[in-house]
Image (cartoon, rainbow, N blue to C red):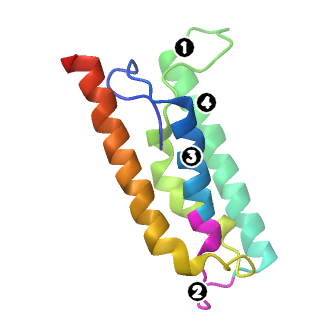
Amino acid sequence: FIGVLGWMNIVLSPYYYVFAYLSIFGIALSDKHSVVKLKPYIKLILTICILSIIILFSVTMYSSWNNVGDAMIANWQGRYFIPIAPIILLLLYNQRIFKWQKYLPFYSVVFIMVSILLTIETIYQQFYS
């Protein structure tokens, strides 16, 4: 999701990564719609599906990009997990934590603006200064 830009050589501030992930998960946890109600066994099935996708993806990436015996998976990027993001966020859905819901539109706009401005500033510093 939030990662290194360009050819894996433009790194944003470490504080931004913390801010971004807290924002994404905070917004996901704060939303409340009475239409969404997942039973525990459905959450278990979704968790098994997510773990299976991550394991299969890891095996695929390891076998495609690494030499046999390498300790780490090369070319591991968050963008590959965007297709399963809705399932992950659905698991986080919780109808009990919604006291900040009235601030969600404002906080979402702030998060987006900070992300855009920081990205523009970082790219400008990398290529134009």
Say which residue appears at 55% left-offset and 21% top-offset: 63
Residue 101: x, y in percent? 58, 79
Residue 40 percent across, percent down from the top left: 80, 75
Depth check: 2 or 103 in front? 103
Give whichever of discs 2 and 4 has the lower sequence position.
2
**Stretch in magenta:** 27-37
The residue sitting at 33% across, 29% down in the picture is 122
Q: Earlier in the sequence, mark 4 or mark 3?
A: 3
Q: Are marks 2 and 3 in contact (CB under 8 Å)?
A: no
Q: Separation of disc 3 and disc 1 at Cα?
A: 32 Å
Label 1 Cα neighbours within 10 Å, binned few <14 / some 14-19 / many ≥20? some
Q: What residue did someone put label 4 on? A: 59
Instruction: Give, as a three-letter code, the residue at label 1.
Output: Asn
Distance of label 2 from label 3 (alpha carbons): 25 Å
**Identity, as a three-letter code, of the amino acid under mark 2:** His
Question: For numbered disc 4, what is the local secondary structure?
Answer: helix
Neighbours of disc 2 within 10 Å: few (<14), some (14-19), many (20+): few
Sooner in the amino-acid sequence: mark 2 or mark 3: 3
Residue type of the residue flagged with mark 4:
Val
Q: Which residue is mark 1?
A: 66
* Left or right: residue 29 compared with residue 43: left
Q: Is residue 31 magenta?
A: yes
Local packing at callout 3 (Cα closer than 10 Å; few below 14, some 14-19, many 20+) is some
Name the residue at the bottom extreme: 34
Mark on residue 19?
Answer: 3
